[in-house]
Amino acid sequence: MRPLPPPDMPFWIGRMLPKNHIRYVIDVGDQQQMHVMEAGQGLPVLMVHGNPTWGFLYRRIMDRIAGDQIRCIAPDLIGLGFSSKPRSIQSHTLENHARWLGALIDQLDLDQDGLIFVGQDWGGPIGLRALAERSHLIKGMVILNTAIAPPNPDFKPTAFHRFSRMPVISDIIFRVLGFPQNILHKTQKNPDSISGNIARAYQYPLRKFRENVAPLALARMVPDGMGHPSVIGLEKCRALAKSFTGPCEIVWGTKDPILGRALKRVRAVLPHARVTETAAGHFIQEEKPDLIAEAVKRVVQQRE
């Protein structure tokens, strides 16, 4: 691995990051660089966020589990956080994101120990799609509010995702007005869980119009029909998850207005997983870090 120096970060954000963390950047191809935050040593736990957040989302879990036995790795997806930000919406596909994340995984030297995978929102399918080509690495999984299978043929896209495809107005609302990062608190059971400097930390990396492309692009990555390009990748995610027989837990926020009802479909893909349902919203990491940390610890203990 050839880590590069990380970009500058405001002091007020840095003071909220996990204790004893390190940050670096990795070249993942296509002239893109991925920002990574790590803490601890030992078995790698790869924690992948979704739209429109960054690795900051996992800081409270990292504080609870990183140490001599667990190495937490929280990358920022390309286009988000402190990673490179391609300006073309077309750059953002499930396959591209999985390839970029896979390039990071390949440089982390994980073949000896493998990893525990934690994924939420787009981090679920992007992570599983990357690991579909590296399934020998997976020693356990913790799945948070996400979708890891293609939709049913008769599904209807949510109003949010239909809106993201409206010409012109979606560009204005997402890119000019900073949607949805300016309303993340509305997806929570406890709106105060994303407020003050925490809310600002999610908004800061996307404050410039020319760099604020990924939130709209990732919204459009959600299938609007069975012919959507993401469907094939989601099929591969489902196949990997269904074939996995190792330790697995699901920790779910049932008050999530976006994916709260998707738990049934995730359980169908992972029928052997231990499930913890909780009255949390979409960004469950901000509301229930203790439950997630305990789930990760159990999976680490149960791995082969």
Image: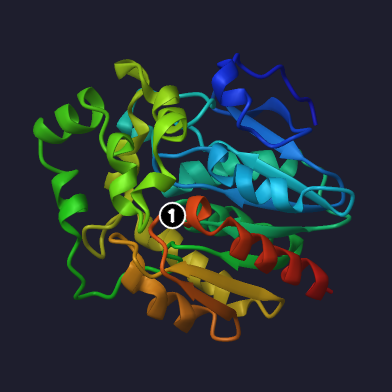
Tell me: 238 left or right of 41.
left
Q: Nearer the viewer, residue 146 or 14?
A: 14
| Kind of element beneath mark 1 | loop
Tell me: 28 left or right of 1.
left
- Residue 226, quarter of picture: bottom left
- Residue 28, quarter of picture: top right
Q: Residue at x 61, y 39 (%)?
A: 75
Residue 56: image location, x then y, percent: 56, 37
Q: Nearer the viewer, residue 19 or 300?
A: 19
Up/down of 231 relative to 77, above or below: below
> Looking at the figure, which quarter contains the C terminus?
bottom right
Q: Residue at x 59, y 80 (%)?
A: 273
| Numbered marks: total | 1
Residue 230: image location, x then y, percent: 36, 55
Q: Is residue 9 visible?
A: no
> Looking at the figure, which quarter contains the N terminus?
top right
List the residue tagged with mark 1. Answer: 121
Q: Residue at x 71, y 16 (%)?
A: 5
Q: Residues within 10 Å of mark 1 (few under 14, many from 20)?
A: many
